[in-house]
Image (tube, grey):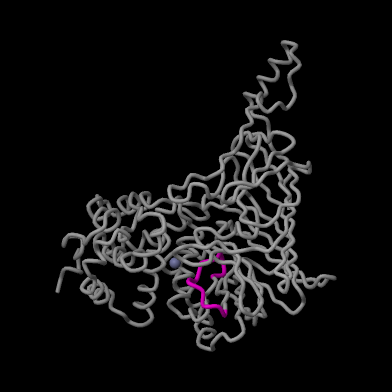
Amino acid sequence: MTSPNRWRRPATVTAAVIACVSLGSGVASADSTFWGGKPGADGAGDSYYPQDGNGGYNVDDYNLAVDYDPAARQLDAKEVISARATQSLSSFNLDLSGLTVDSVKVDGRTAKFTRGGEHELTITPARTIYVGQHFSTEIVYHGTPAPIDDPALGNNGWQYSASGGAFVAGEPKSASTWYPVNDTPLDKATFHLAITVPDEWGVIANGKERGTRKGPKGTTHVWSEDTPAVPYMTTVAIEKWEFDRTKLSNGTPVVNAYAPGTSDATKAAEGRLPEIIDFLSSKFGPYPVDAAGGIFLAEPIGFSLETLSRPIYSGRAGNIGTIVHENAHQWYGDSVAVKNWKDVCLNECFASYATWLWDEAKSGVDLKTKYLAAVNSASATFWNSPGNKLYDMGAGREFTAVYSKGPMALHALKNTIGAPAFDFVLKTWPTLHRNGNAGFKEFQKYVELVSHKNLQGFFDAWFYVAGKPAPEYLYPGDLGKS
Ligand SMILES: [Zn+2]
């Protein structure tokens, strides 16, 4: 898909051109200095991963046409990126790890490009792109994708399964291992994929199925994700899938894909997805995505991930708790994404707490008992480790305390501000920031606004510093009563 050039020249620039013309200078050409075209930033400036993502534009849509041969591990692709410039650009960057770029066009004209750094693809269009301009970038590329080795999570991005298939999963980055991308949570875009594989293979990706067609190279599978996605929430997985299709209570299509060997217990757990999403909707507000389902790998990878509309599950991780967690992320993490990686508690603390709420509602678990047991069993090492902070915990420590201390902190918050205010916050926050980004300190302000309380002491004790919270924060409200 390409976008029409709907840009308009800014009024001030138009006036400058008129002035030049009236003075007889005749300078009306698209000279990049005159027009202020500058290179877009080569990073989006995250405090942990400053080089990930880029500046100077926002992507509206990725449209990928991919041929993939599992036997040869060979990927041949043509990508069209529709974007809008947020500054006048003499050049701009995309992120791409490995692979070989064959050609680049911007608005139909051949563009120069260079590769550099960890994953920078720098594109210099034939003509300056003006601020506000919608522009289309077509990239032809090929190669054998390789995962990024992450010290905490293992492999991230495009990975190979023992069956000979392949799948994409990773956080904080993953997409740049198989397509050029503005790899930052700050730039969400719709995602359209047509992927051709030999007939014996199946394909699952994000969003809605748009059918298949047979051709000389195999079967083309078309998927369409029209809910704006953070790049690392996009995925594709090629396997000899068993598919299961149903609908949510509101008619949203559900597609589940099970790798050969998936247990009946996992299929039964995923069979409860409509019930799980109805439950989560009762807590977090309307389901914010246009499709649902799950991708159940055979491989026991190091994590499961909340890929948009359709989480991807590590082999043997297909249990109810994990399914509730990953689907809770569709509200907290996907629809509302982090502004910076230091805000990751907005994803993980909430998804982890969702399993507490599920256990309370479905299994009669008493959350006060569960909370006090967690506090009583927490060691000094637990409280005092450097990664124990729930905000700005440091690069490489994002995925530690958020799962254990995170839900405890939210339960303590509920008992500090009271259930009505807490439930209201949980249910309205995702709607307030739907399809956007939010920071953790904005969340604090919102909780203070709703509860009419100054909660700085509480947030310091639980989120902003490591160490065991003082008794007033550890045993608020009903939690302090025997
Ligand atoms: Zn999670």
307 inside magenta stretch: yes
Determine the residue positioned at 56% across, 43% down.
42
The spot of residue 346 in percent (x, y) is 40, 58
Which quarter of the figure has residue 390? Answer: bottom left
As drawn, 225 above or below 449: below
Q: Which quadrant does ligand 1 occupy?
A: bottom left
User: In the image, is 13 to the left or to the right of 442?
Assistant: right
Looking at the image, which residue sits at the far left?
Answer: 482
Query: Which residue occupies the extreme top position in the image?
Result: 23
Q: Is residue 478 above or below residue 455?
A: below
Residue 279 position within the rendered picture, expressed as x and y whole percent measured from the top left: 44, 73
The C terminus lies in quadrant? bottom left
In the visual, does 417 lie left or right of 91? left
What residue is rendered at 50% in x and 58% in y? 172
Rendered residue at 61%/63% (across/down): 146
Q: Residue 145 is drawn in which quadrant?
A: bottom right
Name the one closer to the observer, 410 or 167.
Answer: 167
Q: Is residue 123 above or below residue 324?
A: above
Which range is magenta? 298-311
- Residue 184 located within the stretch drawn in magenta: no
On the image, the x and y values in percent for residue 120 come to 60, 48
Q: Which residue is at the front of the view, 344 or 416?
A: 344
Q: Is residue 28 left or right of residue 278?
A: right
Q: Position of residue 389 (x, y in %)?
A: 31, 58
Residue at the extreme right of the image, as rendered = 216
The residue shown at (56%, 66%) is 169
